[in-house]
Amino acid sequence: MSDQTDTGNRGVKKGWADPEFDDGDWRTCTLPGFWEQWEDMRIDGAVWFRKTVSIPDAWAGQDLNLSLGPIDDFDVTCFNGVEVGRTGEETPSFWTHPRKYSVPAELVRAGDAVIAVRVFDRFGEGGFAGARSQMRLLQQKNDTAQEIELHGAWTYKVEQALESRPWSRDRAAAICRRNRAVRDIRILPPDSTMP
């Protein structure tokens, strides 16, 4: 059984990352969580999530850390309409890798800001797989200062619904073997031999 294929990011072309986009007709969910646990969401594919947060005056023009915890499987994350990070298949154990992205100071203005995340799930469960405490936004220079909690209510919309493929032991074993092989790759100088 092969993995589901991402046919491209259609949501960004529709403006779903833009802060001015009206997501009033999108459904509401509580994150973190897997969307297969929600009503009518037994799908693989691409789902967009959006959250509006209020940036304090003191944070304006400051670099921020955006933490979302692990996302299953892949993500593209935007802040105020600009991509600030992505995690794909190139990352070992991508489905358990905590997402931590830097938000550059030029994107940070006092008042409302929109975080938009496109998640692509190619098999098994999809969504935000971490703990509530992993979902937060804070200043880079002052990690002990005030933080904005990102868990809780978000809006979401399905971009691409694919028939759900269950997680199997064979699939799990294949992924583990592939990730182990990636970790074991060694880069050697051209004149050396493998030990």
Image: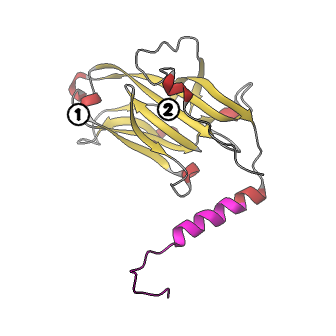
In this rendering, position of residue 49 left or right of residue 177: left
Range drawn in magenta: 173-195
Check whether the beta carbons of the residues at disc 1 and disc 2 lie within 8 A of each other: no
Residue 179: in magenta span: yes
Q: Residues within 10 Å of mark 2 (few under 14, many from 20)?
A: many
Residue 62, which numbered label?
1
User: What residue appears at the point 24 percent right and 30 percent down from the top-left corner?
Assistant: 106
Task: Give the quarter of the image for residue 177.
Answer: bottom right
User: What residue appears at the point 38 percent right and 42 percent down from the top-left corner?
Assistant: 101
**Vertical placement of 166 versus 20: above or below?**
below
Task: Give the quarter of the image for residue 107.
Answer: top left
Residue 159 at x, y percent in the picture: 61, 27
Residue 179 at x, y percent in the picture: 59, 63
Residue type beneath disc 2: Val
Residue 185 at x, y percent in the picture: 51, 72
Q: Residues within 10 Å of mark 1 (few under 14, many from 20)?
A: some
Frontmost of labels 1 and 2 is 2
Residue that badge 2 annotates: 117
Residue type beneath disc 1: Gln
Residue 116 at x, y percent in the picture: 47, 28
User: What residue appears at the point 58 percent right and 49 percent down from the top-left corner?
Assistant: 95
